[in-house]
Image (cartoon, rainbow, N blue to C red):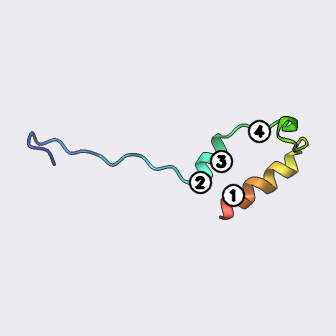
Amino acid sequence: MSGNGETKSAPAELTLEQIIERCNPMGNLDELLIGDLTSADEDKFFGILEGA
């Protein structure tokens, strides 16, 4: 607590699930030498990240 009676709140923390929910689809990844990902591919990818 600071000297003037105010309390400081801790910074908000995001869960991995919240971060993933805010992400946009990856789209065309040809420039990275990776073919387009289907929705199923993206779901699998983010599922792996969520489980990590």
Q: CA distance from mark 4 to mark 2?
A: 16 Å
Contact check, label 1 and label 2, Cβ < 8 Å? yes
- Residue 25 marker: 4
Contact check, label 3 and label 2, Cβ < 8 Å? yes
Answer few, some or many: residues within 10 Å of disc 4's Cα (few below 14, many 20 plus, some between 14 and 19).
few
Please name which of the two marks, 1 or 3, marks the residue nearer to the observer.
1
- Looking at the image, the residue that sits furthest to the bottom is 51
Q: What is the x, y in percent for residue 13?
A: 46, 50
Q: CA distance from mark 4 to mark 3?
A: 10 Å
Circle 1 is placed at which residue position? Answer: 49
Q: Residue at x 74, y 58 (%)?
A: 47
Amino acid type indicated by mark 4: Pro
Local SS, label 3 = helix
Find residue 44 and report its image quarter.
Answer: bottom right
Circle 2 is placed at which residue position? Answer: 16
Q: Residue at x 80, y 52 (%)?
A: 43
Q: Which quarter shows the C terminus? A: bottom right
Local SS, label 2 = helix
Mark before the other along the chain sequence, 4 or 2: 2
User: Viewed as shown, does residue 50 lie left or right of 34?
Assistant: left
Q: CA distance from mark 1 to mark 3?
A: 9 Å
Mark before the other along the chain sequence, 1 or 3: 3
Local SS, label 4 = loop
Q: Is residue 42 above or below residue 32?
A: below
Amino acid type indicated by mark 1: Leu
Contact check, label 1 and label 3, Cβ < 8 Å? yes
Circle 3 is placed at which residue position? Answer: 20
